[in-house]
Image: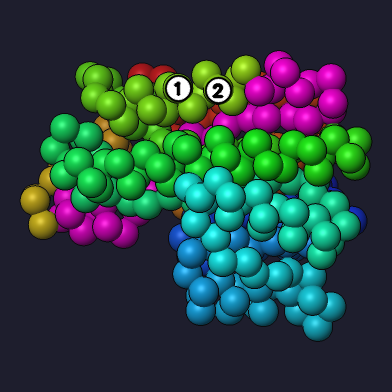
Amino acid sequence: MSKLNAYFPLKNKVAVITGAARGMALHIAGALSAADARLAILDARVQEGRAVARMLGGAQDRARFWQLDVSDNNAVQRTMAAVEAHFGRIDILINSAGIDVDHPSAPELPIRQWERAAQLNLNGGIVCTKHVLAAMVRVGGGSIVNVLSLYNLAEGRQDRTDEASTEALHLAGLNAQRYASCNIRINSIQPGFLRPPKLAEAMREAGELTQMLTDRAERQMLRGSGSATDVAAAILYLVSDASRFVSGSELVIDAGYGGR
């Protein structure tokens, strides 16, 4: 990922990444760090979040951790203010915090699990966006990327998870229009099936994982399977000046699966 630094430099930029203590968001944080961005690592997991900040911050302390539940409006407001006070600015927000559910179909989820997933996966991004906009206006612009789910593109899926993803895209589009005059760009990434650990394990136990992977291999246009690095590279493009004319867009990274 370090070679991308020459193409998409983020020197002097400050990036806020939610859910960055593990998984895909950790890879995203690594990519932005390699491009010379300073990082605010936000996550509810204290020990892991601090370890990531130490790993990516280096001797120059270019990364710092803040514990945060992105569904808590007041906590988000305080944390974004603290990030701006510490680094002096906020240029980038990656809304990637969320939780895996045991099954992608909302009707099969316990209601409390569904409500918690909605709070984090949908409301969290809206709340975080709300509280970074003023900081971005103060530095003359910024870039926000929402990491969404591919499930709403899958054929035949008509449950509430689809509606939530569709609504998230709608809100992102409205915000992109509203804040374009402030030089704030807002885009969305929809990764393909990258086997979130809890989901993959649940499907394996139900005997569905092998069939899912077989079906995807048959339907996708490109061979092989994607990784978090593919998503991180796309996000690096969207937050850099290389995409300065891109806003309100939706980038799907699925080897062509959704287009068949």
> Would residue 73 be seen by someone viewing this image from the given angle?
yes
Q: Is residue 227 above or below residue 65?
A: above
At 26% across and 41% down in the image, what residue appears?
114
Label 2 environment density (alpha carbons within 10 Å; few <14, some 14–19, many ≥20): some
**Magenta part of the protein: which range?**
175-204
Q: Residues within 10 Å of mark 1 (few under 14, many from 20)?
A: few
Q: Position of residue 239 (x, y in %)?
A: 74, 41
Residue 244: x and y in percent read 82, 30
Q: Is residue 69 above or below residue 127?
A: below
Would residue 178 appear left or right of 259 to someone viewing this image?
A: right
**Regarding mark 1 in the picture, which secondary structure is present there?**
helix
For label 2, the residue is 171
Q: Position of residue 92 (x, y in %)?
A: 74, 46
Left or right? Give the position of 245 relative to 228. right
Q: Secondary structure at mark 2?
A: helix
Residue identifier under label 1: 167
| Residue 133 lies in quadrant | top right
